[in-house]
Image (cartoon, coloured by chain):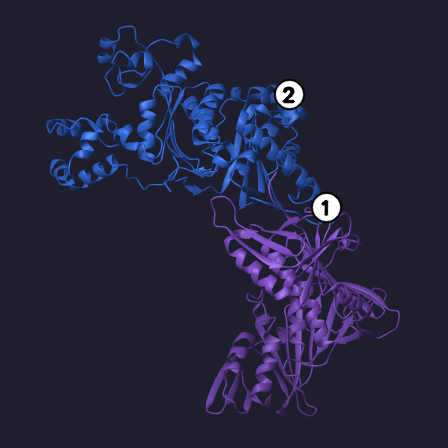
Chain colours: A blue, B purple
Amino acid sequence: MAPDATILHADLDAFYASVEQLLDPSLRGKPIAVGGGVVLAASYEAKRLGVSGGMSGRRARELCPNLTFVGGHYADYQRLGDQVIDILRDFTPVVERISIDEAFLDVGGAIKLFGSAIGIAATIRRRVREEVGLPISIGVAGTKHLAKIASQVAKPDGLVVVPVGKEREFLDPLPVTLIWGVGPKTEARLAESGIRTIGELAATPGRSLKHLLGNAVGDKLSSLADNIDPRGVESGRRASSVGAQSALGKQVVTPDLLQTTLGFLADRVASRLRAAGRAGRTVTVRVRFADMRSVTRSTTMSGAISATSTLTEVAIELARVALDDHPTETSISLLAISVSHLADQAVLQLELPLGLADDARRPGSEKGAVRWVADRSADAVRLRFGRNAIGYASVLFSDVGHVPDEFRELAEGHGLTTPR
Amino acid sequence: MKFQVERDVFAEAVAWAARTLPQRPPVPVLAGLLLEAGSTGGALALSSFDYEVSANAEIDVTVAEPGRALVSGRLLAEISRSLPAQPVDVTVDGARVVLSCGSARFTLPTLPVDDYPTLPDMPSTAGTIGADVFATAVSQVAVAAGRDDTLPVLTGVRIEIEDDRVTLAATDRYRLAVRELRWQPERAGMSAVALVPARTLADTAKALTGGAQVSVALSTGDDAGAGQGLIGFAGKGAAGQHGERRTTTRLLDGEYVKYRSLLPDNCAAYAQVETASFVEAVKRVALVAPRNTPVRLTFTADQVLLEAGTGEDAQASESLDSLFESNDAPVEDFSIAFNPAYLLDGLQAVDAETTRLEFTTPTKPAILRGGKESESAAHEQDLRNDYRYLLMPVRLSG
């Protein structure tokens, strides 16, 4: 039986330029370039006129006289890129991020939960548009290489699916330049032999290709064109901790602020742990005061937790301890939560009600089991309708919960897996 | 000090006394084994102590010259274990102990015997218990004790003595094992409780099966005599015939959990399986359940279906004959999931040809006990095998 097309290549369209247009609405619909002396990225409006990355600023202006150059908001690129990757990770932990704005996913294990790969791709595109505000193109295929080609064909803002068995039909008419690793030089050499499309390349006997391009390159090209690509999606080594932080400007500490902010952060961290089937025993909270000095407090529990409300409770307690130890500090500029000592927790081992002091925080206690069910129901709703579809009341009805995107500097790293 | 001893007798006594020596002693002398050759008759006492556990063995030797010496226990145990079957001669020569056996000869440095701590006194004897029954009962219960030192109370076996009945209990939150048995109390109507480190208790009970009886020494709350906060056990070693073995262990502090209320009076349904074939089947399907992912059991009237593995992962299933009866309304089938390691622990501890599993709901504890109902009623009479293993199930998904 042929495997299904379950590999997605998700690639944000003209990423830097799209972010600039998102941050400054007056730039939307206009040809813009990020950079100055050299074009680092161009919006689709500029690309249409021939402007492309790597081009000199002067050449770009010649091609497009009303081109607007904008400075790079790098912190925002990282933040928004991370948000998009977080959305991808809501569907599967098997996410291989290959740069700030693109990643491979294998949704083979997620289909039972969320329906077909095509449905998942469409939901991802809608959620990225709605929650982050950026256009993203996705290619769906049976191999990584083909998925990448499909996403290039899908651009801008599209979705292209290559069903298993239809690869040759899809590939044959495409230009050889779409193959990963075929640059202008290789293209020119192939063109000299009359090879312009992938179909023509595939029809060329392996030996002539090797003669044309050298052994290694020739072998690689012919197997790629024949849709041979055994590489799996590598989600990277497992991380040892999961964290989230939120910069607050400068705010006076109130019980409300702690509840809301830590509740929001705990929700992000805990739901990411659950998505990966993990839980952690050690919780660390960092409090940064208005003068930028920061203190951390941590606690290790007898059992690993992944419940949002348990993590919120523990985090608030830790923040309280940190604040009580520094009674002269009345305002804070940042809160962060991190969970470490991670262990697998895909199923819930229930516990006997022994009446011990830590029962309420044990995942398998009666209370823990109620939270387990509640969290998983919320996770399921969010996977279908997006992160803001459901939340804990205290977070949801506050400003923070309603517009989490307004949280500045929400740099949470890359989640449960670290790209290599 | 100078004595001669039979090789097997010596090797076995050294092994017993060196058994509890710490791997990394906090002070060097605690790695030592104390040899004391008495002046009267021919007895050798071998002792070890690490402030938690003390062990002491007495064996018959031929004493030529009384005296005492402290040597590395681990080294002495290894040497005595590998000696040829010949009489062993041990002599202190200055700061060394010379051990010769046949043509083999060992010279060991001694440790400063004056620095060695005094071994605790044995508390007064509280009663005696059959050595085999005790070893079985302890192993049945200790399996459920916690191993996580963050909550020391759960690493112990709770011992409750009420006249001629002893109850042993242990739990690690996931399962609770309770065993009741009879013993011979020193004094009628006595009542006492103790919390003993489970691992030490299990090792001790196993090592004392050489004789018919084990005597238990426990200082009861009201007497401020010797051995406060200690429990002591005395009996014979595996080979039995040579002298006495004694050990003391410091009790764990803290209030034990109120476990009796967790033992339900009745159940909604029960199943009966043939223990050995059920164990084999669980082991087989658990091969595809890595890292304690669950084994799912579905009981129908005369069969149980075992399944493990989900989705893309490897999967396994197996059916076995079993009886299933519901006490309330008739039930078509009943499904419940367990951590296979915990389930196997319970099945093996039940120590009976057939195992009875009692259920309430798929999220409430199941009870494993030995035998058919009629037999288990009979057992309740004489407490020969009144054992219950409560096991919390695994909740599958949302």
Which is in the foreground here, disc 2 or disc 1? Answer: 2
Left or right of A365 in this view: A334 = left
Residue holding disc 1: A357
Mark-to-mark CA distance, 2 and 1? 32 Å
Q: Nearer the viewer, residue A229 or A164?
A: A164
In this orientation, does residue B357 appear?
A: yes
The residue tagged with tag 2: helix, strand or loop? loop
The reply to whether the C-beta atoms of the residues labelled 2 and 1 are less than 8 Å apart is no
Q: Chain of mark 1?
A: A
Left or right of A186 in this view: B160 = right
On the image, the x and y values in percent for residue A93 come to 47, 37
Name the quadrant of the C terminus of chain B. top right
Residue plotted at (30% across, 12% down)? A46
Q: Chain of mark 2?
A: A
On the image, the x and y values in percent for residue A406 come to 52, 19
Identify the residue at the far top of this view: A66
